[in-house]
Image (cartoon, helix red, strand yellow):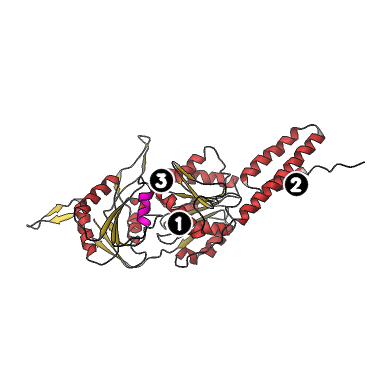
Amino acid sequence: MSISPSPPAVADLRRRIAELLPRDERRLQRRLEGTRKIRDEAARAVALAEIAVEVDQARQRLQARLASVPAIGYPESLPVSQRKDDIAAAIRDHQVVIVAGETGSGKTTQLPKICLELGRGVRGQIGHTQPRRIAARTVAERIAEELDRPLGTTVGYKVRFTDQVSDDTMVKVMTDGILLAELHNDRMLRRYDTLIIDEAHERSLNIDFILGYLKDLLPRRPDLKLIITSATIETQRFAEHFAGPHGPAPVIEVSGRTYPVEVRYRPLVAVTEDDTEEPMDQVDGIAEAVDELGREGDGDILVFLSGEREIRDTADALGKRDLRNTEIVPLYGRLSAAEQHKVFERHTGRRVVLATNVAETSLTVPGIRYVIDPGTARISRYSNRLKVQRLPIEEVSQASANQRKSRCGRTSDGICVRLY
């Protein structure tokens, strides 16, 4: 008389299921719970055996994902690379880590790679948020290029109307609006094992809501790691907001990679023949600054403007000045991907890049030696009275002015002309 093999122990299956990819874990956990309703022992044994087979298959998928983690290297020229061991230790030992670094430190592109090297991104994805769509796509392209993987495989991105994420994706770059939308269907954010909230100091309504939600979620998701990056101005507030039983979240500061930048103040006033001052049009002020910087030597110029209309008006005015060997290139969120890409391509001659504050953080426009800053930006504000999100043009903060200035000290000495 043959003895049929005993069914797998439920406790053992539950332990093995807990180690699987989240989508397999949830599905098989529900199936395992369903076997409790089966009264017939033989039928229950068959169901448990089938689940055990599926657990083995899911385990193979996990092993394949683990094996697909790319080899990781770090550009030595980036300041964040010098602190990668400290950052990795902090992420390993704490649930929340604040990384403070000025523009040019490399934190945006290198943090996801540090997380991959720690084994994050295997059981769940590394979610990496950016305040703007153009930054999300460009950051994803850069990380994919450094990992030598096609975009949409190991590294993907998701923004409104575009989804380049697959089942193989380990690093998912997205706007903070996408993450907020996902909360509707995935309150526990189970698809992620790590979240990087980049440029959190911008403090949009989306970011404020996400950070408030995560503070409540983290105790219920002890496996979820949160990394917040910020300019140095907000770090202590973030650290205290996410304070745990052992005190504030750790803050790691990374210096920016900057050369000396000369600041020149050129207020928008014109001196008349009788030595009185009259207000100067902003476009004329920018044109004069472009002429002044053109006499300084080679190097591209980055001009910060408030919006599309200001960019078009300035481009038209500069186009009429017949600037020799100079190309005028716009950069703003609603441009097509091909037009946005143009800013990052190699070129000859001089470029004048006319950009919204999308170029202030996250994105690094290569080759910039000079910056022209009119000192204004279209800032997202929530009106509590009107219950709507508004975009008024305001004077930029000192922190934003410094971010803009640092854009021209990346590869050599620079000059920042402030039109105020």
- Image height of 82 relative to 169, above or below: below
215 sits to left or right of 359: right
Residue 73 spot, x, y in % from top left: 52, 64
- Mark on residue 204? 3
Q: Measure how far apart labels 1 and 2 are at the Cα level.
A: 42 Å
Query: Which amino acid type corresponds to the residue marked 1 in the rendered image?
Result: Arg
Residue 341 belongs to the span the image colors magenta: yes
Tell me which residue sits at (21%, 62%) in the image.
292
The reply to whether dot 1 and dot 2 touch (C-beta < 8 Å) is no
- Image height of 44 relative to 218, above or below: above
The residue wearing badge 1 is 142
Query: Which amino acid type corresponds to the residue marked 3 in the rendered image?
Result: Ser
Q: Secondary structure at mark 2?
A: helix
Residue 125 belongs to the span the image colors magenta: no
Quadrant of residue 220 within the rendered picture: top right
Query: Which amino acid type corresponds to the residue marked 2 in the rendered image?
Result: Asp
Q: Is residue 73 visible?
A: yes
Quadrant of residue 391 within the rendered picture: top left
Q: Secondary structure at mark 3?
A: loop
